[in-house]
Amino acid sequence: MRRLALSLWVVGLGLAGWSIGTRLEVMNPTGQWEPTPTPEEQRRWSLAREQFGDRELVIVAVRLPPESRREAVAAVARLESWVAEQPEIVDVFGPRAVGRLDFELRLPLRPDEMQRLQQAVLSPDGGLARIFAALVPPEAPGSLAHKERFLSRVRGEAPALIHEDSELLLAGKPVLDIALNQLVSRDARLSVPLALAGMLVILVAILGVAGLAPVLAVLAAVVLLAGALGIAGVPISTATVVALPITAVVGLSYGLHTTMAVRRRGSARAGLRLVRAPITWAYATTVFALLGFALSSMPAMRSFAWATAFGMTVALITAFGVAPHLVPAGRTSGRAAAPGRAAFRLYAAAARRPRLTLSLWAAVAVLGTAGTLRITLEPNNYLGFFPPDHPAIVAHEELDRAFGGSVPLFILAVADTGVAYDQARVRERLVGMVDAGADIVDLGNALLPVDPDTRRREALIQELSAGWFEAA
């Protein structure tokens, strides 16, 4: 009966783990990694969303063949028209849009201004073209469904629309969101089972059948954590996903200590009496430290703190409530005691040579202090999550080389009354802001401030640009 119950327990946990791996989706809700805004920042953000919506940009780029460049650019224009027709797209700007502007504004715009606008979508060497596609706001904050539909359609149909010697590249935050979701989902289906299998092999080799107990306990803890997140409606995000491996690692430690104590004392009651105090105090101090992040101004950090603290609580419960019941009768083998003997020998060697030990630890302290002086803070850029040969990284690097930065810069200028561009003060501040930014960093060629004198002289520019600068 006990073997049957154990078999059913293993099958049930396995099915639950498989369900988690197949249903896992990494969500990155809007603003989760941003600090809590001040009322003034919130007001401006609300104005920006009111005017422009909650949109994201996909950059559809095409590497053009040098021997057929004219035909390839014409094919990019056809691709641009196709992208504009997709239901997930609000606005599109690319070589076709620039060509249309060139035709409509040929007389008013100076040649150098049109050339700057052309270089925003076509690299100076003519080897790379890009199309900016603004997506409709998601159905729910952080949802990947509409991004996935659009990118899947682009990858499936766009190659047939471009020149046969051209190559399609996709970049932008939506592309990275989908790629990150695929990487984490793959890890959940591959890395987690492999990690659990590796732990099981090691523990069974050391403890025999008793090695099953901590592994099954930690698997139960992970399944319970994932189930609780699902019931509470908390998505698996770039913050909460970290709670799963932490729960597995800490839960395995708790379960292993409990299992070995039970084997050493010969009964569950005596074994728990031996380890319950150190494990409980270790749990309490760790959870207390984790909950310090619950005071963070960033919602993602608060989610990480609560999810991880709950995961460790479940790990403690399964270590005390599940693992002892799965430990078969018997004593700890010599192989299981080997790490303890090695640790004692290390301690004895250090105790016999106190001066050498003190010197070694002093050297470690010096090196550690020197290392802390070299610590740098990585920019808030999750491109580091991806392997260097990932297609999304390759596309971004290619765009960076061709255009000097593939991530668009958004500037919101708020006017107090009327139409912004008709106010000289607002117009001068806009031009001054762009010029000041260009003095600090290369803004590329996408920002094209219209010369006020030219706009005043040319009625066509006044008519076409009147709506460009409207604000509440």
Image (spheres, helix red, strand yellow):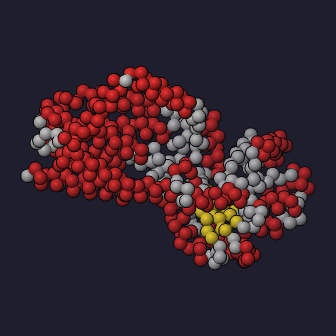
| Residue 8 placement (x, y as % from top left) | 17, 55
- Is 372 on the left or on the right of 466, as rendered? left
From the viewer's perspective, is 34 left or right of 272? Answer: right
Residue 436 in the image, given as x and y percentages of width and height: 79, 41
User: Residue 111 occupies which quadrant of the picture?
Assistant: bottom right
Q: Can residue 228 be seen at all in this image of the molecule?
A: no
Camera sees residue 6: yes
Residue at 56% in and 66% down: 87
**Of residues 345 and 131, which is closer to you in this image?**
345
Image point 79% across, 65% down: which residue? 101
Report the label total: 0
| Vertical placement of residue 166 versus 269, above or below | below
Image vertical order of residue 103 relative to residue 383, above or below = below
Q: Determine whether, in the image, residue 250 is placed left or right of residue 396.
A: left
Percent position of residue 16, x then y: 28, 54
Q: Residue at x 17, y 33 (%)?
A: 271
Q: Residue furthest left?
A: 1
Q: Nearer the viewer, residue 455 or 57?
A: 57
Q: Residue at x 16, y 35 (%)?
A: 264
Q: Position of residue 13 (x, y in %)?
A: 25, 52
Q: Quadrant of the C terminus?
A: top right
Q: Would you identify the image quadrant in which residue 275 lies?
A: top left
Residue placed furthest toward the top: 355
Seen from the viewer's position, the closer of residues 316 and 117 is 316
Position above or below: 385 against 361 = below
